[in-house]
Image (tube, rainbow, N blue to C red):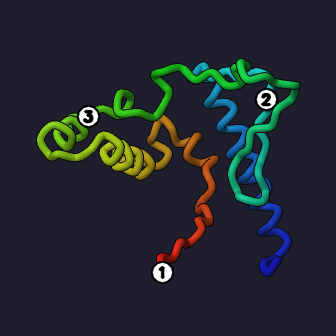
Amino acid sequence: PWYPAHVDTFLTVMREKVLSDFLRWCKGERVRLDGVRLERDEEHGGVRVVSTRAIDDRSILIAVPEDVVLSLFTLQSAATDLLIQEGGFTSPSVLQLAIAAERAKGTASRWHPYFATLPVQEDLPMLLLQ
C-alpha cells in the first residue's frame, strides 16, 4: 500500500475491534447466529456472513428480535410521525432520514456497533440513458 506498514497494522486492529464490538452487541441485543459466522470483509471493508454448515431454504441463520431491527417502529419519534402524517413523506423516505439521524449520533447510538460494520462506501454501477 501507499501508506506505512504501521498504518496497515492499526487498520487491521481497528477492523478486529469493530467485529468483536459488533459480536458483543449482538449478544447483548439477543441476536442469534445459527450455522453462520461473521468475519471481516477485507475487500469491501465491512463484515460478511459465512455459512458454517449445509443450509436449506427453511434454515433460520440469523434471528434478530423485532425491537432491534432498524424500522420506523424502533426509530419512532415525534419528528418521524410529523413527517409521515403532516409532511406527506413516504414511510421509506422517513426511515432513510431516521437512519441517517441515528448514524449521526455516533457512539451514542444504540446501533453504533452495527453501523460500524457497514462499508464506508459501495461502488454502484452508473447507468447512462441514451
The picture places residue 86, in percent across and down from the top left corner, at 12, 41
Name the residue type under label 3: Ser
Q: Which residue is mark 1?
A: 130
Mark 3 crowdedness (10 Å alpha carbons): few <14, some 14-19, many ≥20: few
Mark closer to the chain start, 1 or 3:
3
The picture places residue 101, in percent across and down from the top left corner, at 36, 49
| Secondary structure at numbered mark 1 | loop
Q: Which residue is mark 2?
A: 36
**Residue placed furthest toward the left:** 86
- At a point 58% along the width and 41% down the height, the residue shown is 113
Q: Which residue is mark 3?
A: 77
Circles 1 and 2 in contact, beta carbons < 8 Å:
no
Instruction: Quarter of the image for the N terminus: give it.
Output: bottom right
- Tell me the CA gap for discs 2 and 3: 34 Å
Tell us which disc is closer to us: 2 or 3: 2
| Secondary structure at numbered mark 3 | loop
- Tell me the CA gap for discs 1 and 2: 44 Å
Mark closer to the chain start, 1 or 2:
2
Mark closer to the chain start, 2 or 3:
2
| Secondary structure at numbered mark 2 | strand
Q: Is residue 102 above or below residue 36?
A: below
- Tell me the CA gap for discs 1 and 3: 43 Å
Instruction: Tell me: 118 left or right of 75.
Output: right
Instruction: Tell me: 77 left or right of 109.
Output: left
Q: Is residue 44 above or below residue 70?
A: below
